[in-house]
Every structure is written in C-alpha cells, then in structure tokens.
Image (cartoon, rainbow, N blue to C red):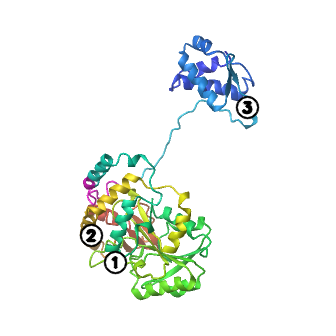
Amino acid sequence: MIFESAWYDYQNRNMPKYVRLYYCIRREIEKGNMEPDYKLPSIRQVSKELGLSSTTVENAYNQLMVEGYIYSIPQKGYYAANLDHSLINVGTLPVKKVIQNVNTRVIDDFLDTEIFNFGDWRKIYNRIMRDFKQRLLIEGDPQGETELRKALADYTYKARGVVCSPDQIIIGSGVQTLLHIFCDITAGVVKPGVAFEEPGFVDVRPIFQKRGYKLHPVNLDRDGINIKTLFKTEAGVCYTSPSHQYPTGLVMPVQKRMELLRWADNTGGFILEDDYDSELRLSGRPVPSLYSLDNSGRVIYIGSFSTVIAPSLRISYMILPDFLNERYKNIIDGYRSTVSTAEQLVLTEYINSGLYAKHLRRMRKKCSEKLKLLNQTATRFNSRLKIYSSGTGTFVLIEVMSKHKNKKIRNSYLSELWNGFYVFNYANINPEKYEEILEQLI
C-alpha cells in the first residue's frame, strides 16, 4: 500500500489509531503521491495488512470523505479526490506546542477573599440550577432576562433616583459590550465625536475609535469636566462619571450637572453617565444620578457590578431614554445575549432577597476600616507618600514625593496615572499587604 510506510513512521504517535491512519492517507494525497481518482485499498485489505480492526479503517475513511480528501463509488470503492495542490500546505501529524516563559499574573497573596460572601451566592446558584432547568436550556433574551431588568428598575429607582421601566434596560457582559450597542443605536443621529474627562477612564476609548469616533479629551476643573471647553468641541457624545470621577474621585455639583445637560440640549448630543462606584460612598447618602435630573432624554445611564461584587461576574447594564429605546427595538433582532442566563437569575435573587444591599453595607464598612488602616500605614513613610481619598469607592490617589517617583510599577492593583501619581485599588487588598505594596513606590 502506498501509505504503509507512513503508517509505520507514525506508529508510536499518542493518538487514536483511526486518527493516525487518517493523517497518513491525508498526507499522501496532499503530497500528490495519490493522484486524483487513485483507488484506495479496500477496508478489509487495510485492516489485514496493518493489523487494524475494520471499524478503525472505516472511521478513518469516513473522516477523509467528510473533509473531501476522498470520495466513494458504491460497489466499487474509495478514490482520492482531485485537489488543487498549489493551494495546499502539506502538513504532518499535529505536534503539541511546548509553551515556555509564560508569566501568569498571580496576586492571590494580596487579595482579600473575605470581602465577598461566596456562600450566599453559591446557595442561590444551586437553587437556580434546580428550579430553572428548562429555562437554562434555551437561549436567553438578548436584552437581558426580564426578572433582572425588573429588579434593576426597582433598585436604581430606590438607590439612584432613576425612573425607568424594565423595557428601557439592556444587560450586557461589561461596559464595552454595551457601548458597541450604543454606537449601533445612535449611528447617523449624533456627530461621530466623543468627549472624555481628562484624566479619565481610558478602557472604553478604543471602542469609539474603532467605530469611527473622534476623541475629544476635556480637562477637569476643580468640580469636574470643563463645560466651556466641552462646548468648543465637535463632540456629539460626552462620557462622564459625575458622581465619582475616575481617577480623581471628584463629585460634580448640581450646577455643573445642569450646565452639562444644557450642552446636550443645545447641541443635540447625548451624555453617557458611567455611575462608577457611586454606591460605595463611605459616609452620607450616595449623590443622585445625572439621569434623575434629565428631562430631555439625553442621558444614558450605565451601571456595573464588576467593582462592587467581582470583575469576573461581567454583568453591566445600560438604561436608555425613550428615543434611543425605540431605535434599539428596531435592531434588537440582530443581537444575542452576552450574559449567562443562570448568572442573571442568580443576581436577580441576590438583589431581591436583600443580600446585595447587605453586601453593600458590609463593603462600605470594610472600605472605611481599610481606608483608615491605609492612612495609618502611609504615616510610616513620613513625607515620601501622600494619600488622596474622596470618601467614595474602592481606590485612592497616591502621590509619591520621593526621588523615585518616576519608578514604573506594573500590577493590577497599583497603576501609574501621571508623573508621581498612582491609583491604588485598596478595597480588595488584604490590609496586611499595604506596607509591602506602598514600599514598591519608593
């Protein structure tokens, strides 16, 4: 047989015999050793000469036929197909690649695993698995599960002053996913330019660049984005975090919020309100949302559970004003759900049962205690470090006063903002590690 030598060459390969035979015959066809219409030996002959079972040979031949390398003629046998060899990259049996020098980011020693009650989440998850078997075997609602949208409509009204119906809410696997939908909805109705706070949240900017938007960085005043500069841009969209600006922690006062809404009214623009960390105000009540002040349907509210529960949860939501919601309904058939139905139902129960509110209260208390410990730890470094806290959220600004302030730090909880300033996500870190982390800066 023409492929017998190849079979013995690959005799010691660690794979099923039918797969080995398949690759041997395929290689001979690709090399041209089996010309078009060459008749292959019968299954019985191959089985006898190579000491294989008929099933093994038949499985190899069937796979070759499925992929188009051979064809069969009833009552006559199997034949090599006519392939264009100029387009074929002659392969060999696949060899597993050895991956070397892979740096896995391991920060388990720093994370505080007690900040989230996994037991509560697991109990609800098990109950969802038991009670929603049929529901979990079908495709989810592209807009998000109705139960979760109802829970969010109720929650955002009580916690953030947002008046909306569940029909206005879209669930997505992260803010970036939702912004792609926003770009689809607003295509042709806004100027392709987006204004960002500078400094501000940079992770979403590539989304707009890839969708053809021009970026307009707008500097911050002492109380938030500079409205005069915003008016001078050609932006049709403004991306802002008025209740807790990242990374400064600034809270936009009501007068500036009114001016921002006036910008949207006068220019026909839209405001993307990223309500980042606003629920984690360590003292007093959270500041009401910008959406709650909007009477013209110009604000799109964006919320996420990545910070307050866990980044791996990947559940965010977007609340559309009526005009954009109508446009969304016209294109919804082109989308599929990007979030697990099971996770959505678990989160629904987590919110409705009061466990989410309990978690927030616990997290505020922990953040307050940790911030106090961080400030105490920072005093050990005398005048070399200075901590700036807004009293909200999970991060602080750290200014390095020492001669080492240009030192490059690369990790997931401590990142350089600009010369001498760093953002430290302290809330999820074990306080025992604060000193070790701060020492990296000096």
- Tell whether 368 sits left or right of 246: left
Q: Position of residue 185 (x, y in %)?
A: 56, 68
Query: Is residue 318 depicted above or below 55 in this figure?
Result: below
The amino acid marked with disc number 1 is: Ser
Query: Is residue 306 depicted above or below 376 in this figure?
Result: above
Front disc: 1 or 2 = 2
- Tell whether 82 sits left or right of 285: right
What's drawn in magenta, residue-wise?
107-120
Query: Which residue sits at x=35%, y=56%?
Result: 345
Callout 2 environment at 10 Å: few (<14), some (14 to 19), or many (20+)?
Answer: many
Residue sitting nearer the eye, 302 or 106 = 302
Cα separation between marks 1 and 2: 13 Å
Q: Position of residue 241 (x, y in %)?
A: 43, 75
Quickly name the residue at label 2.
364
Quickly name the residue at label 1.
390
Q: Secondary structure at mark 2?
A: helix
Quickly name the residue at label 3.
83
Q: Position of residue 203 (x, y in %)?
A: 49, 66
Compare marks 3 and 1 and give the one earlier in the sequence.
Answer: 3
Specify whether residue 108 is painted magenta: yes
Q: Position of residue 212 (x, y in %)?
A: 62, 68
Q: Can the viewer see residue 384?
A: no
Assess whether mark 1 and mark 3 are in contact (beta carbons under 8 angstroms).
Answer: no
Q: Where the N terminus falls, by quadrant?
A: top right
